[in-house]
Image: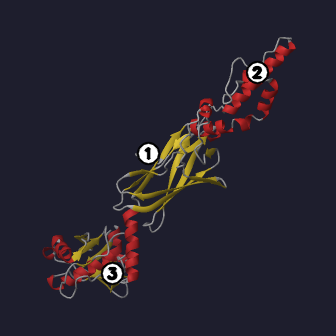
Amino acid sequence: MSNLEWLIRYENEGTTLDFKREQYVKANYNDLIKDIMSMANAPIEGKKYIIVGVKDKPDGSKEHFSIHRDEFVDQATYQQIVRENVEPNINFAYYSIELDENLLGVFEIDNCDNPPYMMRKDYRSLKKGECYIRRGSQQERITRRDLDEILQLKSRRVFNDKISVGFNKRLEQKIIVKAAREVEFPSEKAKQKIETILRERQEKSKLGLNDQHGWTPRFRTPFESVPFEERKTEELERNLEDIRNIYQDDDWYYFGEEVSEKINLVLKNDGAKYLEDVSIKLRIPSESLTVMDRIHQEPQTDYDLFNTTPLPPVIDYYPSVIEEERVYIVEENLGALKHQQYSEAFNENLRIFFGRSSVGRTFTWNYKIYAKNLPKPINGELSVEVV
């Protein structure tokens, strides 16, 4: 049994379903206009039906009044009379269905995504600007509250399922990234080098060899650092104890810019309007990965320190990243999201470190999109597989 057949047999009249005993004829075309308009304005998703040839009796049973096939009205006739008198245009079809050897007519009203619909001009008892809505099995003039509901539904119809989010312009919902398996921080390299130098000096001292360490072979400016090999042993030992602090900037730069993945999201508005004051909130599980909360600048070299020309100020366009319990919250304001265009979610790519512990895992990222002209946020999820 089809859904339509089930409605005709068992459903009672309501906001999305109406029964008429006879077809509309020229003498009652004003009723046709009013009925179609009221259905189209009802702020309910989905198809709405007017079934012709059926009487809905008080006890819930149905009485059928079969239409003679040669009297069945052409769809174009009804569409023309509604189109000439109602604005904007209402999408509906009129077709026949056979049920228990009865020929019935079906008005199917769908995709009414541009309400409110109202009279374009005077037509008999209907006046220009009048607007009706169906509520239950009744028709009423539209009220301010009705209009608010209509506009809310209109916003959902304009944007729902029409905002696409993905990792690139192909709007892929899942990407595969490689974990950083071999990670050696600058501080670790420096530590190993100092330890090697100290060990070699100890071995030379045991052999009674002349130790020339600490001798500076050439003049150096105050801005140049002395190589480890030319530093005194006492200085190297102090460096070794404080190696993490000395190389903190180098380590963060290496961590964020050299071994982390740089990831952004792409949004596409396939709706018919701009989204205004758009913002996005992204939730990333924090287990087995690290999301940088800023872009770490490359440490200055000796030449940079010696150069007295002031560096341009660093403007931070990185999104807000806050770590909460077992999750990173990433937020960004996008401004207006133009329709039929791609927009990156973040002004700067997220820096995300995937280490060995993340190998073989798939992370689910949840996002919410907010906008001034969205009645409620748009929710979705993306996946990142680590290999």
**Residue situated in front as seen by the camera: 263 or 217:** 217
Residue 224 image point, x, y percent: 66, 28
Residue 211 image point, x, y percent: 81, 15
Where, by quadrant of the figure, is residue 276 drawn? bottom left
Query: Is residue 64 visible in the rendered structure shown here?
Result: no
Q: Classify 1 as above or below 137.
A: above
Residue 33 image point, x, y percent: 23, 80
- Which residue matches tag 1? 168
| Residue ID at (45%, 69%) | 375
Amino acid under disc 3: Ile
Residue 133: give its label: 3
Residue 369: give its label: none
Residue 342 image point, x, y percent: 39, 50
Where, by quadrant of the figure, is residue 230 drawn? top right
**Residue situated in front as seen by the camera: 345 or 136:** 345
Amino acid under disc 2: Ile
| Badge 2 element | helix
Real-space CA distance between mark 2 and mark 3, rounded to the nearest whole angstrom: 87 Å
Tell me which numbered mark, 1 or 2, is placed earlier along the sequence: 1
Disc 1 packing (10 Å; few <14; some 14–19; many ≥20): some
**Residue situated in front as seen by the camera: 16 or 282:** 282
State the quadrant of the C terminus: top right
Q: Classify 35 as above or below 271.
A: below
| Badge 3 element | strand
Amino acid under disc 1: Asn
| Residue ID at (86%, 11%) | 208
Q: Classify 225 as above or below 289.
A: above
Real-space CA distance between mark 1 and mark 3, rounded to the nearest whole angstrom: 43 Å
Tell me which numbered mark, 1 or 3, is placed earlier along the sequence: 3
- Which residue matches tag 2? 197
Q: Are marks 1 and 3 in contact (CB under 8 Å)?
A: no
